[in-house]
Amino acid sequence: MAEWVGKQASGTGATARGIELRDIVDVWYRRRWTIMALIVLTIMGVEIANYVIYPIFESRVKILIEGQSGLDVPFSRENLVFKKTEITQTQCEILICQPNLAQVVTNLKLDERADPSGSLRDTIHAGWRRVVRFYKDTKEGAKRFVVESVFHGTYKSPRLPTGFDRAVGYLQDDAVVRVEPMTNTDFVILTVRDRDPELAAVVANTLADVFVKSELAARVARAQDVRESVDRQLEVRGPELHEAREAVARFKREHGIVAIDRQIDAVLEKLSLLELSYWDLSQKEEVRALSAWDSVRRESSAIRDLSHREKTALIDKLSELAELETKYQPDHPRVVAARAAVAEVQDKLDEARDDKPQAEDPPAEDAESLRASLMEEITRVRAELSELSEMDTRYQDLVMDVENSSEVYKFLINKREDASIAQFTTQPQGRIVEPAIPSFKPVRPSKWMNRGLGLLASIAVAVGLCAALEYLDRTLRTPEAVSRLVGLRTLGSVPYVGR
């Protein structure tokens, strides 16, 4: 019978007909003490946690990160924003680096900071620290036992952190010290949290001050290193520049260079005229060739009537005068003497022309010897042009060396001046805009939020527990439940009579 009743109870009842509000109220009424006990216990636990947890206070410092001097400024706005963001992120990492935190610990003697004591909260935390220390010691002892007793090895205990290490590690926690850049600005916000509001403000201001001073010192040190490096390079580049200039001056003196470009142009023009005259002399009549050659030398009428010896002498004098005019100024003594010699030869030629009868056509032997003389002159001028070209190449190489050395020397001088200015500057890259002040309003724990979450959690746990208990409870409490279970009408019931 009991087995049959259990099967019927599992297949009928409130689940078969659906849950009504009356059933929910009935369940709550029957389990009200359980629900209230869970809620009260949860709220008490939340209040105990709010009391045990130390209140954490927060202080903030606003720091302006200014741009470095000498940075390459990007052309586009996107690159400029990216460059600024990159610099700001870098400075944020430098701000909370281990050397700066260690300097703060040293300045404020945080490694000598004693644990709070005197209150129940402090006693609870001290007991928890002893439990943690006991757990670590037990774990260390177990490791030592396994290594030495089981594996018969030598166990080397790890180095225990000192008070200084613990203080630095405490500041390295993101929940204690945090730095964040402000979007689209050059500002960074340094946030420090601690259970002591005044100490939080002091740590924030000290860390910001250490960062500013360290950045200035690093900037001066970098400038000094750059200046020393530039000085060493100037000691090498200075003599190189002087030697290059001396090489150019010595080359000009040895080869008598005044304007080598004009010399080459004059020789090219002379070679062109000689080759043209030689071609005319070979292809045309000897008289017209002699006339073209005489027109090049600007004395054609006199040369046509002279002997081969006299014509050769005039050509030599004119060639010598042309070379001297390309090398020296018009009033140079050598140029004046050459002009006088040309004039003297010209006078002799004029006298010989007046004394010699005019000839309609020059003799064939004179034309042949003039052609040979032209070829010799062309060969000599070509050799002179080749020599001038080689000389010009060497000269341009020397000039290029001087220009390169001069540019490098000027660049080093400018860098040295910039490094000198940066070395003696007193303007740091970072600047404290808004120092931290103590805030006596804790940021955590948020007591009312904890209470609300605890209340919601207790209600959820109570509902789940009541549902589980109701599911496991198969007691028949009402006549209606008995009627639904056996499928018969209720004829009567015996009321409950208390004592």
Image (spheres, grey):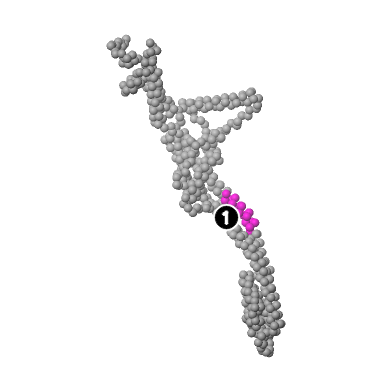
Vertical comparison of 22 with 77: above or below: above
Residue occupying image coordinates x 71% and y 82%: 365
Tally of numbered discs: 1
Identify the image quadrant of residue 348: bottom right
Vertical comparison of 263 with 15: above or below: below
Which residue in the structure is indicated by mark 1?
415
From the viewer's perspective, tell me whether residue 111 is left or right of residue 249. left
Task: State which region is magenta.
Answer: 222-238
Work out which residue is located at the far left of the displayed protein and give it. 491
Residue 285 is at least partly visible in this image:
yes
Residue 153 within the magenta-colored segment of the rendering: no
Residue occupying image coordinates x 45% and y 29%: 53
From the viewer's perspective, tell me whether residue 107 is left or right of residue 35. right
Residue 236 within the magenta-colored segment of the rendering: yes
Vertical comparison of 154 with 204: above or below: above
Residue occupying image coordinates x 44% and y 27%: 49
Identify the image quadrant of residue 45: top left
Residue 107 is at least partly visible in this image:
no
Question: Residue 162 appears at what percent x and percent y?
Answer: 57, 33
Nearer the observer, 61 or 408: 408
- What is the quadrant of the N terminus in the image? top left
Nearer the observer, 191 or 142: 142
What kind of secondary structure does the magenta stretch mostly adopt? helix
Question: Residue 328 appears at what percent x and percent y?
Answer: 64, 74
Tag 1: residue type? Lys
Vertical comparison of 441 with 428: above or below: above
Nearer the observer, 271 or 350: 271
Residue neighbourhood size for the residue with mark 1, other residues' Cα within 10 Å, grouped as few (<14), some (14–19), many (≥20): some
Secondary-structure class at tag 1: helix
Question: Residue 434 appears at what percent x and percent y?
Answer: 45, 44
- What is the quadrant of the C terminus in the image? top left
